[in-house]
Amino acid sequence: MKIREQIFLYKDIIFYLFFGICTTAVNVILYWICAYPLNLEIMPSSIIAWIFAVLFAYITNRKWVFYSEATTSLEKIKEFFSFLGCRMATGIVDWVCMFIFVLLIGFNDVFIKFAANVLVIVLNYIASKWIVFKHKSST
């Protein structure tokens, strides 16, 4: 199989990984800004960073990764809240990792933030592909 065919075959995964890396960058950079220059506590910094990362991820995933089929306002609202619900579940995974590995055990906060986001990216892909942006033809 030619490289072009491989890229087309795995296009959604490639785009998801690219935007997942961008989302992780948004999350980690905003966390660092909140935690260090703004001197906020670990958990508020994590929550603020998560909110902005989720908004960024929704916009990019909807348009360039999963090609949302939602057209009406009601469909878009349902899709957004489904996305938000899934991201809240994986956000809890992120926060639990920060709580356990940084606050309780004492590991480096930025390293754990990055590592937790790798796990979260995988979980978010599964949720987005099979729950949020599930195409009507696959139901």
Image (cartoon, helix red, strand yellow):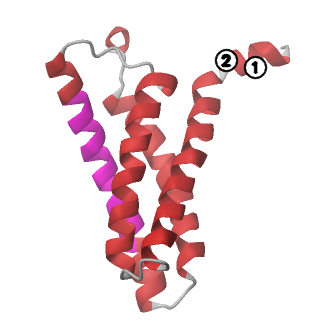
Question: Which residue occupies 65% across, 31% down?
Answer: 14
Q: Is residue 116 above or below residue 11?
A: below
**Quarter of the rendering occupied by the C terminus:** top left
Question: Magenta span has 85?
Answer: yes
Q: Which class describes the residues within 10 Å of circle 1: few (<14), some (14-19), or many (20+)?
A: few
Q: Which mark is residue 9?
A: 2
Residue designated by label 1:
6
The answer to which of 32 and 12 lies nearer the viewer is 32
What amino acid does circle 2 point to?
Leu
Residue lying at the far top of the rendered structure = 137
Local secondary structure at mark 1 = helix
Amino acid on which the number 1 mark rests in the picture: Gln
Q: Is residue 16 left or right of residue 55?
A: right
Query: Which residue is rendered at x = 79% and y = 14% of the image?
Result: 4
Residues in magenta? Answer: 78-96
Judge by depth and name the residue closer to the eye, 40 or 9.
40
Look at the magenta stretch and give its main secondary structure: helix
Residue that appears at 56% across and 74% down: 110
Say which of 51 and 116 sits in front: 51
Percent coordinates x, y for residue 79 in the rendering? 25, 29
Looking at the image, which is closer to me, 38 or 59?
Answer: 38
> In the displayed structure, would residue 130 be above or below residue 40?
above
